[in-house]
Image (cartoon, helix red, strand yellow):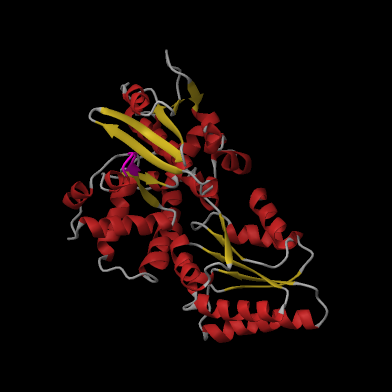
Amino acid sequence: MERTSFILELIGRMKEPRKFIQVVAGPRQVGKTTIIMQFLEKTKYDYISDSADAVSENVFEWLERLWTAARLKLKNGSKEVLLVIDEVQKLSNWSEVVKKFWDEDTRKKQNIKVILSGSSRLLLKQGLTESLQGRFELIYVPHWSFSEMKKAFGFTLDEYIYFGGYPGAANLIKNEKRWKNYLLDSIIETSISKDILMLTTITKPALLRQLFDLGTAYSAHIMSFTKMLGTLTDAGNTVTLAHYLNLLEQCGLLGGLQKYSGSKQRARSSSPKLQVYNNALLTVMQNSTFKAVRAAPDTWGHFVESCVGAHLVNNATTQHYKVHYWRDGNNEVDFVVTDGKKLFALEVKSGAKATNHGMEAFKQQYPNAKLYVVASKEFESGSRIPLEQFLKLSPSELF
């Protein structure tokens, strides 16, 4: 299946005059390489394409050889050439070398357009902000949505809530043990060991792994860093935990939503609401089965709320909004979404969850906010968005 919007985005940007390096970034196993390959199949431009996935030679020499091949195509009559480098973050000092060749082409007015891709915003960002500032545009590719998984693999709503949106694992869901092993070995272990531990300085790798295990299991729960430290066995401090949570978030795995507040300082000091970016990460940490989870109302309500949160955070980067939660005493709102001065509050109702008066209290404090209830069952009062409809829409439409 094609993720058409991203392919069209690349096509449109490549038609423009050469100005920026295009960077395709996002979590592992969301189809970035496939998007680029499908784009190249549709393009009429001459191109050079290679992957840095297994480069063992000198980085400068490897990149120089690619650039030389692209420049040779120009000398042989091509009006413009695309140079595509996949998994570029695996090259040491890649950004300095790319900057050198890109700037040379700019000075000499050589029409070589560059597309880079990588599996982590964190790792790419290190090179982009340090060396390539002002020279690139980002195309962020998020996890697969419910609509995409339904269209490509026939996922039902319940299957998406439980199994999430990893296309590579979709055909394994009838064998849950095999599906979980695939996620653990090919996605989770690879993301942590290659995207964080090997390429980022981590003083307490065991603590990072424990934080991931704890955070995914408690997705959609508010938990203070102090409480986390009391649960984890490896010694650490709250600053270290906050840093590690940020690294996991930059890899599109697990984040911590901050409390919505008029004071940024108060929001940053609040306990985070843990939130996975793909509900498969919640499921794989549960010692249960699809049938058992679906039959337990409280547990299923937890999965539903986490799925709603994943949909919100997944779209936040591309739709340019921020996701929070809100709590004041006993009053709580599941999610608060902001875009500048625009604001809406969202409560998730799954049938087993007790009713609270958080929405009313929130509205009293923030009268300009829009209020929504996402419901998997019918309720007697309140405006509702059916869960399936919510997972198909762009959250920014609710502003």
Task: Please indicate, yes or no, whether residue 1 appears anywhere in the rendered image.
Answer: no
- 281 versus 189 height, above or below: above
State the image quarter where residue 42 is shown: bottom right
Where residue 34 sits in the image (x, y, percent)?
Answer: 63, 59
Q: Where's residue 30, x and y in %?
A: 54, 54
In front: 5, or 398?
398
Query: Is residue 41 visible from the viewing direction of this image?
Result: yes
Q: Residue at x 32, y 54 (%)?
A: 212
Q: Is residue 88 left or right of residue 183?
A: right
Q: In this view, does 296 lie above or below 270?
A: above
Residue 156 point in image, percent of width and height: 54, 34
Q: In which quarter of the image is residue 362?
A: top left
Looking at the image, which residue sits at the far top?
Answer: 380
In this picture, residue 75 sits left or right of residue 327: right
Task: Check residue 17 for magenta coloring.
Answer: no
Residue 286 pos. (x, y %) = 33, 44
320 w.r.t. 33: above or below: above
Which stretch did the figure color magenta?
258-263
Q: Place residue 45 in its image quadrant.
A: bottom right
All told, the count of numbered labels is: 0
Q: 341 or 272: which is nearer to us?
A: 341
Q: In this orientation, which residue lies closer to the viewer: 26 or 366?
A: 366
Q: Main secondary structure of the magenta part?
A: loop
Q: Residue at x 42, y 42 (%)?
A: 323
Magenta residue check for 261 = yes
Residue in view at x 28 percent, y 40 percent: 222
